[in-house]
Amino acid sequence: MIQFHNLLLIPALCCPILAAAQEEVAQEPAAEVKSSPAPFIRLVEDGSWVRLEVAARSFSQHDSDGQSTGPRIDLCAAMHVGETGFYSGMQEQLDACDVVLFEGVGGQFIAVDEDGTVSEADRAAISVTRRRMRRTAIAVARFRKNHEHYPEDITKLDHAALPKRIRQLALMDSWNHALLYELHPPAEEGGEATFSLLSLGKDGEPGGEDAERDLSFKDQAPIQEQEIENNRGIQQDMAAALGLVFQLDVMNHLGPQWRNSDATAAELVGWLEGGEADQTALMSALDGSSLVADLIGNMLRLLSYSESAQSMLRMVTIEVLARAEQVMQSKATGLGDLMEILLDRRNEIVLKDLHGILSQEIPPARIGIIYGAAHQAAFQDSLLKRDFRAVETIWRTAAQVNLDELGLPRAQVDWTRRALARSLDQMLK
């Protein structure tokens, strides 16, 4: 049987917050730091409507006259499941930043090179180029699976292989040179064709060293079948069950300023190895690789066929997520060791990256961090200790449901909500 705290972690780990395109912008008061930290999630009730709202809070440093003296930092609570309209606002806000640190446990290490002779900007450009090359290589493999042959020209990849929203960036390296694609016929009769994908580096010329050297996709880990199938496990099943979309299917993380700031999958598995069995099972369920994932996925897919079931699941999700930030941060009974891994260690990675950016001689004017709401309190606390202060909060409606339209007597709906609230509140005691 799946433990309740594991079900809670499905939305909390990947923060699958449901979304609607509504925003409320609030200027933060100029008062000193409050004793209780400002939350990133709140529940709002308006008649029969219940809304889950999530914050994007901006910070900056000020001089004695109250004038901004340093970078603006936007802490945006990540949400992996929501309505398409929500993500356009999130994308616009983050694309206005000079640097964006984003959440995403990866299957391999493709971060910036550690070669000290390469500048920070060039190392970031190399990382972005590798990420774009992988996305394009996956599209090529997906095209082959769908059409039983490789494309002759990657500019002719169809939408099913490479969505239009990321096409322009995916086919270019960070220096605005087109990626070089070559199709190789079988080396022998009965063999299979192969392909190569290459960036000529910063100078756009063959060879070179440091940032000018060529970058080849063959230096990356082989493409996995789950990447070709676009299989992201429970998150996508949850999106379908709620009538929503998955963040990675609609947001573009390939911009030149977007930098992955998270653990690799190998690191995460290593951290979990000494933990309880259900922790490892949780990770398998989240990436869709276990029997548990199959069972939960089938259940969620069945719910997607019923409009009333979708609405009821949406209500339950709102109630859980409204308190998830508190439960995760409190490290409630049974969650302490796991939260130390899923929250604290990953927070350290982001804070280290942020410190490096802020330590630059001329730091970027605007920095964005998109991460789960439970992580944001640590980032907020770190900024306040650096004498940053909140200057603006955008509250976006993350989910809403009309309790009178669930197809159940209102008394039964209210009882269900109270029972959920009691269960979650018990975890905080």
Image (cartoon, rainbow, N blue to C red):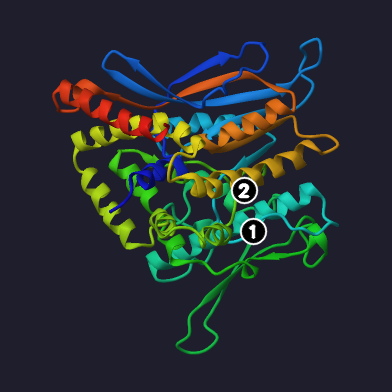
Q: Which disc number belongs to residue 201?
A: none
Residue 30 appears at what percent x and percent y?
Answer: 67, 11
* Comes first in the chain, label 2 or label 1: 1
Quadrant of the rendering where the N terminus is positioned:
bottom left
Residue 52 appears at what percent x and percent y?
Answer: 39, 25
**Crowding near the residue tagged with mark 2, few <14, some 14–19, many ≥20 C-alpha atoms within 10 Å:** many
**Front position in the image: 172 or 369:** 369
Q: Secondary structure at mark 2?
A: strand
Q: Which disc number belongs to residue 110?
A: 1
Q: Amino acid at mark 2?
A: Asn
Quadrant of the rendered image containing residue 85: top left
Residue with the most extreme bottom position: 189
Q: Is residue 189 above or below residue 254?
A: below
How many numbered marks does the figure carry?
2
**Crowding near the residue tagged with mark 1, few <14, some 14–19, many ≥20 C-alpha atoms within 10 Å:** some
Q: Is residue 299 above or below residue 144?
A: above
Q: Amino acid at mark 1?
A: Ile
Quadrant of the rendered image containing residue 61: top right
Q: Is residue 197 left or right of residue 354?
A: left
Q: Which disc number belongs to residue 260?
A: 2
Q: Is residue 371 above or below residue 405?
A: below
Residue with the most extreme front position: 429
Q: Secondary structure at mark 1?
A: loop
Residue 330 appears at what percent x and percent y?
Answer: 49, 35
Residue 14 appears at what percent x and percent y?
Answer: 46, 44
Quadrant of the rendered image containing residue 399: top left
- Identify which residue is drawn at 25% across, 32% down: 311
- Identify which residue is drawn at 61% across, 36% down: 369
Quadrant of the rendering where the C terminus is positioned:
top left
- Identify which residue is drawn at 27% across, 56% down: 295
Q: Is residue 75 visible?
A: yes
